[in-house]
Image (cartoon, rainbow, N blue to C red):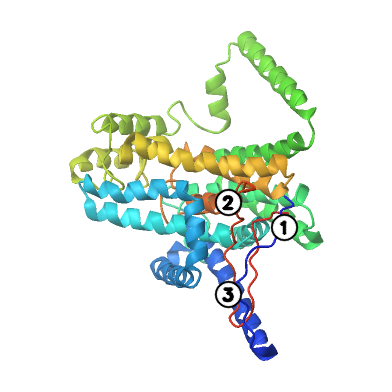
């Protein structure tokens, strides 16, 4: 988008060049610390380096820094929260659910973590431009994948879980696969779509793809490979479609032809299409027990269909301990969720929770797609694919409903970084600045390149 307007400034401070230089240095320091905050949140919310045992301390420091920035830029951040009020519906409902939860302490803790995580995402999206968010995420994931490759022989920490599945420096194979999918699509965009990255960054994208190939091959994650390929191809196809009107008809014709050939082959070979597709990713008809978990969750949702059991009010509930223990004995101790976003939300908060969460996702998808289509913004296309991939994987996994987790924080940050242009009757809103004491502070509106 080419929106590069000026907005109101703080009252100019006239104290000479020395004070202006001091203010400039302070602003530069704040910009560096804000960037470090964003990178830290991305790294530790991705469940990397859990073995260090410092996550609680790091999150406490992140809370303290965020509260400091909230105090410094209260008016700007308040405006950002008001503009993005739809993102606050889900965490607010989670906090309110303490009223009917049978585990009010756990529910309150979950609600607070969720609320702060969402506000951190709003701060990041308001403070940084999409290109900066892209670079921070790329750098963090490149580092995490590089260290995971170094840890192939468990030289740093045990790299394999109890089932001898490779997890790198993450806390589970699923976390490794999820981050690998997002990183693969990010590297693909950086290599083929995004402008003005420079030869060094594009070479880093090639290295990143190589690292992802290694970790997914060692992990033997057919699902991760499939999702990585699908997300990357979907991103490239989306960008081509947005840039060429005639490509839509070609895509529809190609999809129809492939589907027709697949159905014809299925009829002549008596092949079960569903079984064939599941076999490609090494899954059985239960999706490795997921359908059993979904049925288990649906049955318990029907016990309290209107409000649910409250946020974090089910899995630690002693009333269901025997049922949960039976599932964990069958499928492993890692079963601490239903591996489906919709079932999780219904069991926790009922239909209202599902509506609140889906509203947040829909707004983020709409904003990014609008800028990708009408503004020809490649970073918006990347953001759209990131959000769509996270939502798609959440239908087979966990985390997108949790606080302190990168799926939720990342989606909120991307959705906040892109907002629809204000109407002519509205004054443009300001991006949260880096504070430069002793200098006239001009704020930039959200104009995306």
Q: Are marks 3 and 1 in contact (CB under 8 Å)?
A: no
Q: Position of residue 296 (x, y in %)?
A: 31, 32
- Few, some or many C-alpha atoms within 10 Å of disc 3 (few <14, some 14-19, many ≥20)? many
Mark 2 or 3 closer to N-term?
2
Q: Name the residue under label 1.
A: 4
Q: Name the residue under label 2.
A: 414
Placement of the C terminus among the 4 image quadrants:
bottom right
Q: Is residue 265 above or below residue 141?
A: above
* Residues at marks 2 and 3, CA–CA distance in whole angstroms: 23 Å
Mark 1 or 2 closer to N-term?
1
Q: Name the residue under label 3.
A: 435
- Looking at the rendered structure, the secondary structure element under dot 3 is loop
Look at 57% across and 59% down and name the residue there.
126
Q: Is residue 29 above or below residue 133?
A: below
- Few, some or many C-alpha atoms within 10 Å of disc 1 (few <14, some 14-19, many ≥20)? few
* Residues at marks 1 and 2, CA–CA distance in whole angstroms: 20 Å
- Looking at the rendered structure, the secondary structure element under dot 1 is loop
Look at 55% across and 16% down and name the residue there.
272
């Amino acid at each position: 988008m080419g929106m590069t307007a000026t907005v109101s400034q703080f009252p100019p401070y006239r104290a000479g060049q020395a004070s202006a230089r001091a203010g400039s240095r302070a602003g530069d320091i704040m910009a560096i610390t804000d960037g470090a905050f964003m990178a830290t949140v991305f790294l530790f919310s991705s469940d990397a380096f859990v073995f260090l045992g410092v996550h609680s301390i790091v999150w406490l420091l992140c809370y303290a820094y965020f509260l400091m920035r909230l105090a410094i830029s209260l008016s700007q951040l308040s405006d950002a929260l008001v503009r993005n009020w739809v993102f606050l519906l889900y965490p607010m409902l989670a906090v309110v659910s303490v009223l009917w939860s049978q585990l009010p302490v756990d529910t309150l803790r979950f609600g607070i973590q969720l609320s702060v995580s969402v506000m951190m995402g709003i701060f990041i999206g308001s403070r940084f431009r999409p290109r900066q968010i892209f670079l921070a995420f790329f750098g963090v994931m490149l580092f995490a994948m590089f260290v995971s490759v170094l840890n192939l022989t468990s030289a740093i920490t045990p790299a394999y879980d109890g089932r001898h599945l490779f997890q790198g420096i993450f806390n589970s194979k699923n976390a490794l696969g999820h981050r690998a999918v997002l990183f693969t699509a990010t590297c693909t965009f950086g290599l083929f779509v995004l402008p003005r990255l420079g030869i060094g960054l594009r070479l880093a994208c090639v290295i990143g793809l190589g690292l992802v190939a290694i970790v997914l091959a060692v992990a033997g994650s057919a699902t991760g490979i499939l999702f990585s390929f699908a997300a990357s191809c979907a991103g490239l196809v989306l960008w081509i479609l947005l840039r060429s009107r005639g490509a839509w008809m070609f895509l529809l014709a190609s999809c129809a032809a492939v589907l027709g050939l697949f159905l014809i082959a299925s009829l002549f070979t008596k092949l079960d299409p569903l079984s064939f597709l599941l076999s490609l990713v090494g899954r059985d008809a239960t999706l490795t027990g997921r359908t059993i978990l979904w049925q288990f969750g649906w049955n318990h949702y029907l016990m309290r269909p209107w409000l649910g059991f409250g946020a974090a009010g089910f899995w630690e509930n002693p009333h269901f301990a025997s049922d949960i223990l039976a599932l964990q004995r069958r499928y492993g101790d890692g079963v601490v969720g239903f591996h489906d976003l919709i079932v999780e939300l219904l069991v926790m908060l009922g239909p209202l929770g599902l509506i609140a969460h889906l509203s947040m996702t829909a707004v983020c998808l709409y904003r990014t797609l609008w800028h990708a289509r009408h503004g020809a913004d490649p970073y918006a296309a990347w953001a759209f694919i990131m959000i769509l991939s996270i939502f798609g994987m959440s239908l087979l996994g966990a985390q997108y409903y949790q606080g302190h987790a990168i799926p939720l924080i990342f989606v909120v940050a991307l959705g906040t970084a892109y907002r629809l242009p204000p109407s002519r009757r509205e004054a443009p809103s300001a991006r949260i600045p880096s504070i430069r004491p002793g200098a006239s502070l001009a704020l930039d509106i959200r104009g995306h390149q």
